[in-house]
């Protein structure tokens, strides 16, 4: 069975890095024999159009676009079903009524393996399979609307909210320009990664992991401390961040860039970097 992954990019570089790292982790650790790929679809132009719609329906319209895009891709890939991570009641778009409305958007089977799981159960499961530390810890980008969102709409009302917007061409353009991330491209990027001599290298792993194996001339500041304290760091220095798989370093690097720091990070992660160095 081939399982392809689709990520709708809403403009978060750190979140995108976490998605890419999670994909390769799942494929390597749990997807033996799976030849599927990860596709990234730029949704920023669609967001701009969706924000012209009724505020109460904006989150549902965004989810509507996810479903339409996924169904169009399934036709290209000859897929038999869509798989989502939705669970009842987690967010406003995942109430039973809203999920029922979304079921009618796409004419393809929709599989929701987490539909009856609560948040704590999902977190526990992510720890068991090893993806918890890869997860994005920042703001939820797909919650584009504020307060007063619909929690119990119908398919007919959703279509009425969608109809004034010019989404069809934007969806087609987004799919035409989708990016394929595969093993060969990832390996080519990783092969070119080097840790610069001139930068101050910060290792974001735990003290135990750092003490076990680390790169020479690096400083250990665990991620949960660094994400709070970096505001006080010297902005005249140039920083290079490393962590196990590249996700935590991506999150911190993005935050530091927003504050005017000169910073880069090891995208492939130390686990792979140290292994390749042996």
Image: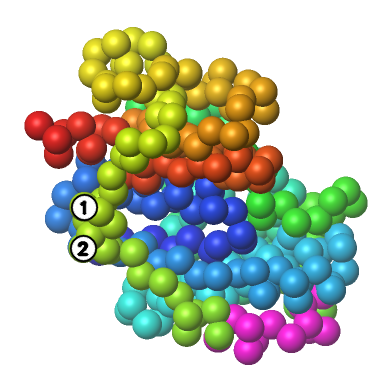
Q: Is residue 182 left or right of residue 103?
A: left
Above/below status of 210 relative to 250: above
Residue at image position (54%, 53%) is 13
Asked whether 204 falls inside the magenta stretch, the response is no
The front one of 137 and 155 is 137
Of residues 11 and 188, which is closer to you in this image?
188
Dot 1: element: helix
| Boundaries of the magenta span | 161-172
Horizontal and vertical percent position of residue 160: 82, 79
What label does residue 200 carry, if any?
none
Decide which of 263, 33 is in the foreground and name it: 263
Whether residue 162 appears in magenta in the rendering, the answer is yes
Q: Earlier in the sequence, mark 1 or mark 2?
A: 2
Q: Residues within 10 Å of mark 1 (few under 14, many from 20)?
A: few
Give the alpha-carbon distance from disc 1 to disc 2, as whole Å.
11 Å
The residue where tag 2 is placed is 184
Q: Is residue 95 something one can see in this rendering?
A: no
Would you name the residue on which mark 1 appears?
191
Q: Residue at x 40, y 82 (%)?
A: 75
Q: Is residue 197 visible?
A: yes
Whether the residues at callouts 1 and 2 have beta carbons within 8 Å, the answer is no
Find residue 33 and report its horizontal and vertical position in percent: 15, 55
């Amino acid at each position: 069975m081939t399982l392809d992954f689709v990520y709708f990019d809403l403009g978060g570089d750190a979140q995108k890095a976490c998605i890419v790292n999670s994909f390769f982790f799942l494929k390597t650790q749990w997807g033996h024999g799976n030849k599927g790929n990860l596709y990234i679809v730029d949704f920023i132009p669609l967001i701009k159009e969706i924000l012209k719609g009724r505020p109460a329906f904006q989150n549902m319209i965004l989810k509507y676009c996810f479903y339409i895009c996924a169904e169009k891709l399934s036709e290209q890939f000859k897929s038999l079903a869509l798989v989502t991570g939705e669970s009842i009641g987690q967010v406003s778009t995942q109430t039973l009524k809203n999920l029922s409305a979304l079921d009618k958007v796409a004419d393809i089977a929709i599989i929701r393996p987490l539909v009856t799981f609560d948040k704590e159960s999902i977190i526990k499961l992510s720890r068991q399979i090893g993806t918890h530390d890869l997860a994005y810890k920042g703001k939820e980008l797909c919650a584009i609307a504020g307060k007063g969102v619909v929690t119990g709409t119908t398919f007919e009302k959703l279509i009425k909210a969608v109809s004034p917007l010019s989404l069809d061409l934007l969806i087609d353009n987004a799919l035409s320009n989708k990016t394929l991330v595969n093993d060969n491209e990832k390996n080519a990027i990783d092969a070119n990664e080097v840790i610069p001599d001139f930068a101050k290298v910060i290792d974001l792993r735990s003290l135990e992991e750092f003490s076990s194996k680390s790169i020479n001339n690096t400083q250990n500041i665990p991620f949960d401390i660094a994400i709070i304290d970096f505001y006080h760091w010297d902005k005249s220095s140039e920083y290079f961040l490393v962590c196990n798989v590249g996700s935590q370093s991506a999150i911190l690097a993005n935050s530091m860039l927003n504050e005017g720091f000169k910073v880069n990070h090891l995208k492939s992660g130390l686990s792979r970097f140290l292994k390749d160095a042996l």
